[in-house]
């Protein structure tokens, strides 16, 4: 039960920080939409996409590798931070000129180019902080990484909102400065966490850095290619459609990104290290954890998809104003199903990373880079932002098919697939009932949809009373025991079961190719 409680505490720490991030993001996004017209809103999203891609390149898989190294081989951790900082600084210096050349060749205006430059500088601080975060997570230390993430997003939101409200015509360059301030505060907090640690060797060892980058090469290549095809839609839209369409897609995609909060907590921060540790032993327990994780995320993903599809017009109208951003609602509906598959893909992909499938995952990413660009070339000229949104969702569907096909046989169990299918069916039932009811008010639609969905989840047996008691016991909200005296918190049941993973130790961060937003949003982990 000690490890149960410890894992629960880790989840609560990470979850609390992500909630604060979401709150800051929500407010900042609303203010941006109110003070920027769709075309400039889209330009800001484009600048952030470039900065996010730069961050993935500078990281180049070292976060995943460092956390795994520190967690599994404590004797090799002394010089790992210094080596990682050296790698990231060199990669940033190499990439920055190319980023600026691309922005100039594509003919971006001076304000957008300056914003890209400032965000690139912010990226350097974020990458330095990320090296420390990877080390701390590898040592199962979650407090300072969580505090720094919250500080970055909250500070950036406060400074950015002040600029938008107080400056008569705020430039993109000034808004970008808000992210730079947040990044500097975040990095300072993380380095403060290392004070007095004699186990860390700060001298630079070029050989150590070269060895680290060689080991990270397959992971880094996957992340770079994966980030490319998950963000190329926005870049292509900017070149193939009017500026307003870019802003509408950016508005919908920000909500899509915000909805990855659950995946970021459960998988990117918690499950990946669990997978890494369990990959060293028999795979039976790993299969159980994957099944439980997929069940949980399928349930949560179905709820999010329901709300986005049924309430898209109301959500866009409240957050962005209907007059300027109404077309974003349909793009959001098309993006929504992709979240369901993204949640599932994240579980399988992180498990395969833990098992050492980097090269196969790189092949998959390269294939989808070609497919995604090809599909966007067809879809964007005909359907603009709706075409880009549909391609994103179809990409997630294709990824799930590919990932399950390359996974070791039996890794994704029949239990997991049945739970996923039942969750999808429950969402479909709830959606049909709500549509037939004729309800239109946001509160009524959302409440009715979730009520019916929850009833369908229970009715189809995706989750049961024992699972709820197990989860309650895990977080100290009840005895965690079934009526017959079984310690249900200690033994997973059918369905989700005790969030399955709770008795395992939490160690480091995961990676999944999605851009780790410089924008104060949970990022398309980042696919990170």
Image: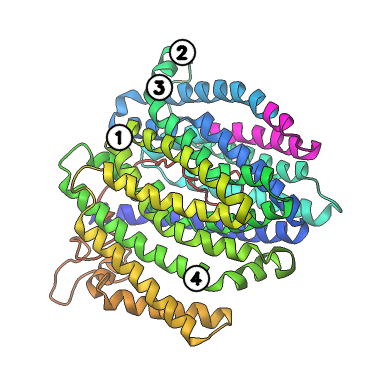
Part of the protein shown in magenta: 101-128
The residue drawn where x is 49% and y is 48% is 146
Is residue 112 part of the magenta span, yes or no? yes
CA–CA distance in space, label 4 to label 2: 51 Å
- Looking at the rendering, which quadrant does residue 139 occupy? top left
Residues at marks 4 and 3, CA–CA distance in whole angstroms: 44 Å
- Mark number, residue 206: 2
Check if mark 4's residue and mark 2's residue have beta carbons within 8 Å: no
Bin the neighbour count of mark 1 within 10 Å (Cα to Cα): few under 14, some 14-19, many 20 and up. some
Instruction: Please report the residue visible at 71 percent of the width from the left and 42 percent of the height from the top.
Output: 176
Residue 345 visible somewhere in the drawing: yes
Residue linked to disc 1: 357
Instruction: Describe residue 499's horizontal placement relative to residue 382 as left or right.
Output: left
Whether tag 2 and tag 3 are in contact, CB under 8 A, the answer is no
Predominant secondary structure, magenta span:
helix
Q: CA distance from mark 1 to mark 4?
A: 35 Å
């Amino acid at each position: 039960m000690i490890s149960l409680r410890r894992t629960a505490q880790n989840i609560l720490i990470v979850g609390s920080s992500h909630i604060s991030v979401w709150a800051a993001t929500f407010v900042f996004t609303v203010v941006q939409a109110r003070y920027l017209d769709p075309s400039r809103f889209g330009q800001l999203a484009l600048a952030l996409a470039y900065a996010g891609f730069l961050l993935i390149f500078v990281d180049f898989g070292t976060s995943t590798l460092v956390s795994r190294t520190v967690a599994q081989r404590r004797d090799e951790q002394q010089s790992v931070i210094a080596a990682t900082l050296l790698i990231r600084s060199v990669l940033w210096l190499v990439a920055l000129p190319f980023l600026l050349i691309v922005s100039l060749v594509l003919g971006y205006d001076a304000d957008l180019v300056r914003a890209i430059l400032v965000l690139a500088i912010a990226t350097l601080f974020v990458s330095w902080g990320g090296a420390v975060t990877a080390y701390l997570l590898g040592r199962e230390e979650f407090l300072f990484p969580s505090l720094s993430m919250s500080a970055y997003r909250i500070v950036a939101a406060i400074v950015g909102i002040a600029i938008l409200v107080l400056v008569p015509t705020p430039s993109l360059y000034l808004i970008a400065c808000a992210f730079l301030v947040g990044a500097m505060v975040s990095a300072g907090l993380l380095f403060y966490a290392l004070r007095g640690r004699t186990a860390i060797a700060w001298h630079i060892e070029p050989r150590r850095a070269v060895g680290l980058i060689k080991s990270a090469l397959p992971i880094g290549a996957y992340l770079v290619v994966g980030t490319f095809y998950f963000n190329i839609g926005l870049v292509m839209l900017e070149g193939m459609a009017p500026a307003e369409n870019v802003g509408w897609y950016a508005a919908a995609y920000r909500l899509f990104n915000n909805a990855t909060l659950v995946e970021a907590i459960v998988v990117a921060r918690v499950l990946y290290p669990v997978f890494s540790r369990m990959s060293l032993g028999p795979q039976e327990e790993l299969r159980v954890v994957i099944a439980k994780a997929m069940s949980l995320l399928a349930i949560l993903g179905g709820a999010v998809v329901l709300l986005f599809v049924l309430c898209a017009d109301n959500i866009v109208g409240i957050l962005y104003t209907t007059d300027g951003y109404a077309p974003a609602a349909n793009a959001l509906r098309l993006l929504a199903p992709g979240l369901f598959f993204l949640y599932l893909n994240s579980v399988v992909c992180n498990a395969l990373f833990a098992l050492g499938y980097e090269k196969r995952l790189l092949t998959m990413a390269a294939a989808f880079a070609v497919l995604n660009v090809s599909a966007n070339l067809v879809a964007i000229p005909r359907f603009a932002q709706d075409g880009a949104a549909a391609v994103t969702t179809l990409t997630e569907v294709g990824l799930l098919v590919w990932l399950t096909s390359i996974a070791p046989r039996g890794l994704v169990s029949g239990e997991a697939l049945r739970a996923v299918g039942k969750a999808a069916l429950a969402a479909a039932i709830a959606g049909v009932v709500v549509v037939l009811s004729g309800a239109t008010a946001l509160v009524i639609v959302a409440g009715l949809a979730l009520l019916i969905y929850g009833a369908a989840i229970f009715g189809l047996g995706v989750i049961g009373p024992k699972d709820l008691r197990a989860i309650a016991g895990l977080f100290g909200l009840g005895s965690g025991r079934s009526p017959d005296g079984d310690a249900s918190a200690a033994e997973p049941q059918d369905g989700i079961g005790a969030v399955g993973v709770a008795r395992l130790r939490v160690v480091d961060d995961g990676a999944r190719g999605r851009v780790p937003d410089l924008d104060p949003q949970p990022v398309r982990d980042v696919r990170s």
